[in-house]
């Protein structure tokens, strides 16, 4: 592609003109001299990973370790996505349904082991269900992994450096560069302006399918049946907690945990009820999911709840961030006034981004179904095995939760085909936006399977580059062999 074709393919030749032609016009803009932006052709990668969350970082490291020139672009200031920028914790289970065998291994296990060695995680073998580390939740929460976000940032930096991944933080995707239906790279917004990254294969790990949607892959938004997305949550962490008192309070009330009309009444619901009576709680939750962290007095709190957030829309996200912070203030006041052990709790920090449970699902060669998961289906082209439960928030009402565990078998498989979007070549999607129904995505969106699918996507991209073919045309059997060589568990 010559420079002009390359820029034409980016859709960026006349960015100023595009702004001026907003339907209906905008007098303040149309009369002004809007400067066009040059795009520097700055980078030439074989594999470009867009989004540095759990899926993206594993994709990039996996590809680079195969000797493929790999670059990752991330809009935030650290790798790790929701685990670091969003302060989401713990890693959900990586074990089978019996709780006997660790089944998500490979790069996930390597990251956990490195974090444990630095005191930044508790190994999942030591964490059992219905404990403070699982917010005393039983179903699907055996063998979670409590984590320290700061240690995770460090470990991911180190692993990328060792593998030779070119990392570019503070860099957001603007547009795909296309050659017909094939991806050819991306235009990104760096601190220096617009820059182009050429790449033979792109792995979309934005969580929202930003690249795939803009490249023309078919997508669904949320649940098309209900027209809703799962609610968003701004996570936060507290410390200075007298954990002995808090644990004693909750453990004396475990027998009162229950579900009423689809709404969970779990940890601290007895205090939330009082706060509601006193007009001091207006959050669409009846209890508090509070997960003990790596250090004894620290806890991660998954409790704010903001309905109908559209992650494609900055105005909607802005509203969610502000509302999340308002709710955190209310929950901190609640801790101080009502919860034994939390009288002097300190807000350590909230996520630097609100947590989005659901936005786009990119339609791929196979759309993962809830029945596949609940029935323990393991397709021939499975790239990982997982047992994570179907976790759907907010479908029955704003404060409902549905949590359905696998009925048949110890695990289910995730087919490689779910990582291959329709209509666009040389593109893989890994992480939250893979091809799955809204409900099935509610199971595999948690971090251990996202890391495993990232590793698989990175290895698939490396096979395509080395074989001079496309991700759609590689043999899934070769990918599975490579996954096994790289310590993944496939049964
Ligand atoms: C409230 C909440 C609670 C959760 N609880 C748990 C839990 O307890 N345990 C668990 O294991 N999982 C949990 N999850 C799920 C899990 O955190 C996410 O689904 C998972 O992190 C998805 O991984 P990902 O890599 O696909 O996306 P993300 O973690 O979202 O990472 C995507 C990355 O891409 C970057 N990015 C996005 N768009 C662009 C762009 N245009 N340009 C450049 N970069 C971009 C983002 O900044 C981000 O770093 C929870 C999620 C939420 C929202």
Image (cartoon, rainbow, N blue to C red):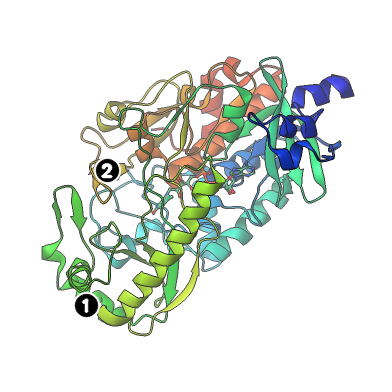
Between marks 1 and 2 in the image, the one whose residue lies nearer the viewer: 1
Q: Position of residue 66 (x, y in %)?
A: 68, 35
Q: Under tag 1, what secondary structure? A: helix
Q: Position of residue 115 (x, y in %)?
A: 53, 61
Horizontal side, residue 389 vs residue 308: left or right: left
Q: Residue at x 27, y 72 (%)?
A: 280
Depth check: give the residue in front, 207 or 149: 207
Q: Residue at x 32, y 34 (%)?
A: 439
Depth check: give the residue in front, 379 or 336: 336
Q: Which mark is residue 54?
A: none
Pick whichever of labels 1 and 2 is earlier in the sequence: 2
Can residue 112 be seen in the rendering of this structure? no
Q: How far separated are the C-alphas under marks 1 and 2?
A: 28 Å
Q: Is mark 2 within 8 Å of ligand 1?
A: no
Q: Is mark 1 within 8 Å of ligand 1?
A: no
The residue beneath circle 2 is 97
Image quarter hosting the C terminus: top left
Q: Position of residue 185 (x, y in %)?
A: 73, 29
Horizontal side, residue 364 vs residue 158: left or right: left
Image quarter hosting the N terminus: top right
The residue beneath circle 1 is 248
Q: Residue furthest left?
A: 255
């Amino acid at each position: 592609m010559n420079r002009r074709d390359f820029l034409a393919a980016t859709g960026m030749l006349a960015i100023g003109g595009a702004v001026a032609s907003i339907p209906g016009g905008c007098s303040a803009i149309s009369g002004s001299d809007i400067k066009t932006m040059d795009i520097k052709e700055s980078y030439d990668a074989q594999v470009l990973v867009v989004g540095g969350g759990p899926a993206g970082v594993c994709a990039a490291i996996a590809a680079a370790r195969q000797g493929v020139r790999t670059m990752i672009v991330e809009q935030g200031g650290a790798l790790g996505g929701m685990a670091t920028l969003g302060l989401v914790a713990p890693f959900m289970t990586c074990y089978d349904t019996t709780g006997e065998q660790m089944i998500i291994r490979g790069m996930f296990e390597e990251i956990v082991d490195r974090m444990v060695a630095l005191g930044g995680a508790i190994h999942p073998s030591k964490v059992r269900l219905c404990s403070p580390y699982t917010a005393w939740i039983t179903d699907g929460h055996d063998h979670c992994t409590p984590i320290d976000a700061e240690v995770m940032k460090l470990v991911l930096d180190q692993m990328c450096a060792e593998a030779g991944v070119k990392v570019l933080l503070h860099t957001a995707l603007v547009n795909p560069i296309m050659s017909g239906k094939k991806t050819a790279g991306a235009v990104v917004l760096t601190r220096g302006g617009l820059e182009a990254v050429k790449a033979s294969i792109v792995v979309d790990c934005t969580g929202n399918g930003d690249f795939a949607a803009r490249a023309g892959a078919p997508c669904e938004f949320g649940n098309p049946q209900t027209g809703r997305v799962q609610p968003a949550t701004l996570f936060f962490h507290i410390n200075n907690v007298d954990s002995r008192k808090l644990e004693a309070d909750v453990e004396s009330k475990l027998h009162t945990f229950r579900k009423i009309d689809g709404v969970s009444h779990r940890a601290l619901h007895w205090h939330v009820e009082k706060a509601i009576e006193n007009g001091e709680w207006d959050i669409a939750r009846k209890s508090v999911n509070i997960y003990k962290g790596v250090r004894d007095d620290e806890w991660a709190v998954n409790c704010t709840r903001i309905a109908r957030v559209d992650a494609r829309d900055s105005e909607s996200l802005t509203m969610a961030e502000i509302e999340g912070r308002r709710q955190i203030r209310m929950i901190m006041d609640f801790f101080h006034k009502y919860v034994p052990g939390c009288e002097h709790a300190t807000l350590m920090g909230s996520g630097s981004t609100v947590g989005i449970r659901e936005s786009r699902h990119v339609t791929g060669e196979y759309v993962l179904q809830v029945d596949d998961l609940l029935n323990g289906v393991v397709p021939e082209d499975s790239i990982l095995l997982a047992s994570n439960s179907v976790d759907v928030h907010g479908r029955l009402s704003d404060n409902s939760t549905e949590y359905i565990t696998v009925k048949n078998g110890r695990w289910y498989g995730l087919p490689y085909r779910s990582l291959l979007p329709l209509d666009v070549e040389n593109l893989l999607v890994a992480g939250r936006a893979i091809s799955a129904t809204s409900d099935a995505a509610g199971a595999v969106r948690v971090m251990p399977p996202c890391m495993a699918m990232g590793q698989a996507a990175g290895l698939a991209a490396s096979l395509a580059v080395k074989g001079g073919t496309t991700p759609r045309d590689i043999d899934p059997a070769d990918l599975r062999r490579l996954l096994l060589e790289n310590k993944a568990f496939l049964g």
